[in-house]
Image (cartoon, rainbow, N blue to C red):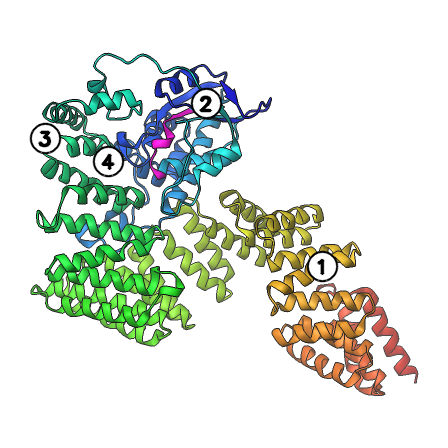
Amino acid sequence: MTGTSTASTPQHLWLRSADPAGRRTAASALAVPAVLAEVSAHRRLRGPYTAAGNLLREIVPDALVRCPDSVARHDVEILSISPELRAIVPAGRETLTSLAVPAERTRFYSRLRTLRIAHGLTEFLTDYLKALGDGPRTLVVQDLHHGDPTDRELIAVLLRRMDPALLTLVVTTGAEEVTEPDTPVAAPLSEALEAYCRRLDHDAEPAPLSPEPARRFVEEDGTSDDPRVLAAYRSLPPEERALLHDTRRQVLELRGEPSLALGAVAWHAEHGSDPAGAGRKALAHALNYCMDMGFYHAVVDYGIRGRALTGFADDPDAWWVFSTKMTTSYAALGVPEQALPIYAEARAASDSPSIHMQAAYATAMLYTRHLDEDHRDHVLARGWINQAIAFARLHGAPKERAMQTAFNRNGLALIEVHDKRPLEALKLLDESMALLDETLDPDEQGLHRSVLRYNRAQVYNSVGRYEEALADYAAVIELDPNYAEYWFDRGMIRRKADQLDLALADFEQAIKLSPPFPEAYYNRADVRAALGDLAGAVADFGYVLELEPKFTDAYVNRASLLCELGDQAGAWRDVEAGLRIEPKNTQLLCLKGQFHAAEEDFEAAELALSAALEGDPANAEAWALRGGLAHQRGELAQALADLERARTHSTDPGIAFNLAVARHDSGQLPEALDLLDEVVEGTGDVDARLRRAQVLIALGRGDDARADLRACVEAGQDPELGLDPDLATEAAALLATLTAH
């Protein structure tokens, strides 16, 4: 066995071999800590989260004894990964989305939900290992090259975040290059393997074939990638092969384990004696389940396989289900352009008003929301959504007609928002809510009615009608108290309204209700900083970076706070780390310039600030800092020029004050006085009052300066006002001089 490096410190291991039996043999021979579990990630077994589900089914019963609080805290992650555990793990955070029956499902999860689940499981696993308390362990994950993107994403997160001294991961793949799916992924496995693992290549001769390899292939649910086994399987007569699949499917179905239906059961039904019947049904079940769970890569896979078994002429309804859920998943995964040809195909194949209505709505959403900016077209989107509304109004059943009309007019409201017509959007949402209230019973379509109100709250927020937005958020939170995004969005409004304690409470509730996501901690950090809890804010920004190491705004803010706390070395590390990720980040370049200026390395400071301005010529902070640097060096003309530019881009009183100082020092006294009048009137700042007094004295207006000087002397006697004692002394001396004359 060969490796890319040798290391004495604990490392995660990546074992590659073309021989599946060799991978298992080599993994078992490694000198690693005691094995916590060995699991296969092959998605043909259980679909999404095959490896993670197998792991949880092994450890959760014990975790309920050792760390029950952690199980409760991570119930969403555990039950999303392994539905079998609902028998022993109570679901404490159900939402209207998770509880909605399929006919009422109008809201789907973000594609980033699986990344949140991965982070939550990482933390649950850490808790469990610490509760075991008996030293380091090893998790062996076989066949990850055949894993669903959910497992691949989870392992990528574990490799980065899990300390190998606590849990060593041994990951096995084939010998070929590990590639990524065609659709975007949040945590690429290939990068994580290269960054966090020591690679071991196993080149032993393939093991002898077992007896009846074709039968074994089916009984092992098609998980072997040994070409000899595959050849034996394919050489079987079709009827014999189908019978093997039927028999194996029946055995698996008797086990009654829901996750098997997402992998092996569907695969055997697809290749058994009734692919167009049992196969289509099994794939449709898996597709619908994964759509509801937000496992969109799997939905695309089931959709492709289902469409291969189902032509439109064979079963239009089944064909449309496979097609429309594929297209919705393409949009969710960030490749909406792949959905357009399928909608065109549906319109060409069908004369169903329902299919045309759904295709029209979805196409409108692609053009107003999902396509990249260069291809969005709100006029085209409006045309498609109006077609969908027209079809909805033709529905014969009054309740369904009302529901579909309201649903599609909600889509039109979104287009109005994107087209910068928020008042039209509000009108549409009000009318849609009234229509449902008039037509439906109070307990019908609760999810969609809450979505309409939530959307109205967002529009109210966008036009600054915060009280109305907060009222709508209160209403949807009452209806759906476990939906974390409602709390998060309300916290954002309360932050804007300077309701800091209430905003903090909302962000903390969002954190409590959801698997970890960086935006919640980032905004809680912002509020904590505003409330004076700098240490708490620094901790939150640190956790943001643990979840998302490329979150450069967290580096910016943590660096600034560390400066305030006197940790210059830590702040400098954050600036350097952030610039490695985003070398042209103007805020980080400004901080870099400030650091160099403080060290009197003026040349380096100038370079950093000039680089910031090259990236953003309207950056007022960079102009002001560069102007201050020139002033510090005595280059008054350059200081004035830069501070004037800063002033054109910002009304910040600090910039106005610094420009006034430069004008004063350059002899431009009337101009300096005008700026200082503005600053004092706007802020009452005592530093500005002292500087104004100095300018007034220089202009021969000593009597006018007395009031400012008295205010400065009084401020110097009040520590809470923060006037530098030296400046207070200077003010007193000037006042005494004026009095003496």
Give the number of the mark in front: 3 or 2: 3
State if disc 4 and disc 2 touch (CB < 8 Å). Answer: no
Residue type marked 1: Leu
Cα separation, mark 3 vs mark 4, equals: 19 Å
Give the residue pinned by disc 4.
262
Cα separation, mark 3 vs mark 2, equals: 42 Å
Q: Is residue 290 visible?
A: yes
Q: Residues within 10 Å of mark 1 (few under 14, many from 20)?
A: some
Q: Residue at x 16, y 31 (%)?
A: 271
Give the residue pinned by disc 1.
607
State if disc 4 and disc 3 touch (CB < 8 Å). Answer: no
Q: Position of residue 404 (x, y in %)?
A: 17, 63
Residue type marked 3: Ser
Give the number of the mark in front: 2 or 1: 1
Q: Residues within 10 Å of mark 4 (few under 14, many from 20)?
A: many
State if disc 3 and disc 1 touch (CB < 8 Å). Answer: no
**Span highlighted in magenta in the image:** 140-149
Helix, strand or loop at disc 4? helix
Dot label at residue 138: 2
Query: Measured along the vertical axis of the image, is residue 511 above or below residue 352?
Result: above
Give the number of the mark in front: 3 or 4: 3
| Quarter of the view holding residue 487 | bottom left
654 left or right, relative to 278: right
Cα separation, mark 1 vs mark 3, equals: 72 Å
Give the residue pinned by disc 3.
273
| Quarter of the view holding residue 260 | top left
Residue type marked 4: Leu
Q: Earlier in the sequence, mark 2 or mark 1?
A: 2
Cα separation, mark 1 vs mark 4, equals: 57 Å
Q: Earlier in the sequence, mark 2 or mark 4?
A: 2
Query: Measured along the vertical axis of the image, is residue 476 above or below residue 125?
Result: below
